[in-house]
Image (tube, rainbow, N blue to C red):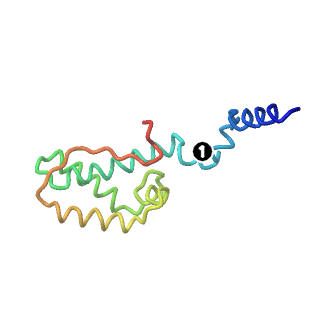
Amino acid sequence: MNLREQSGSTVDHLLAADFVLPEQFWNAQLAATNLSGERALMWAVFADGIDSYRRTANATAVERQVEFNEAERWLLSSDWDWPFSFVNLCTTFGFDPAGVRRALTAWKAQHAHRSLRRQRFRPVTQNAA
């Protein structure tokens, strides 16, 4: 094999496509826990509860006040038995429940007379939904 053939095969080797299996690229356990349908549903419940609290915090209509009271009860509850309880969802996503409660209470005090439109909150890993 001459020098030209060696250098040609080396370049071909360097430019050739590498085969990478999904299991080699993504950590299967991480993907299973971060991108599972159950986790996406849990995030949707968490985001909707916070969005509902914020949208209806200063409501004047009776229906909206009822929605706010329900969201506030969920937020302040310390129920560990229900999988979609506020404290369980905070724990799942790595948030301190007391810290989130303080932040939302402070937000409500600062925005006492503002109304909000519905917002969409997505975790960083849920870009496709």
Please state, as top left, top right, bottom left or bottom right, where the N terminus lies in the image.
top right
Label 1 Cα crowd, 10 Å radius (few <14 / some 14-19 / many 20+): few
On the picture, is 112 further left or further right than 23? left
Where in the figure is residue 48, as x and y percent of width and height? Answer: 33, 47
- Judged from this view, the residue extending furthest toward the front is 3
Vertical arrangement, residue 93 with respect to residue 27, above or below: below
- Judged from this view, the residue extending furthest toward the right is 1
The kind of secondary structure element at disc 1 is helix
Vertical arrangement, residue 99 with respect to residue 66, above or below: below
Q: What residue do we see at 29% from left, 49% from top?
A: 51
Please state, as top left, top right, bottom left or bottom right, where the C terminus lies in the image.
top left
Inspect the image, locate mark 1, and give the three-letter code of the amino acid beneath it: Ala
Tally of numbered tags: 1
Closer to the camera in the image, 103 or 27 = 27
Where in the figure is residue 3, as x and y percent of width and height? Answer: 82, 36
Vertical arrangement, residue 86 with respect to residue 99, above or below: above
Q: What residue do we see at 13% from left, 54% from top?
A: 114
Q: What residue do we see at 24% from left, 44% from top?
A: 118
Where in the figure is residue 83, as x and y percent of width and height? Answer: 48, 52
Q: Where is mark 1, residue-wise?
A: 32
On the picture, is 35 further left or further right than 116? right
Where in the figure is residue 70, as x and y percent of width and height? Answer: 28, 52
Closer to the camera in the image, 128 or 99 = 128
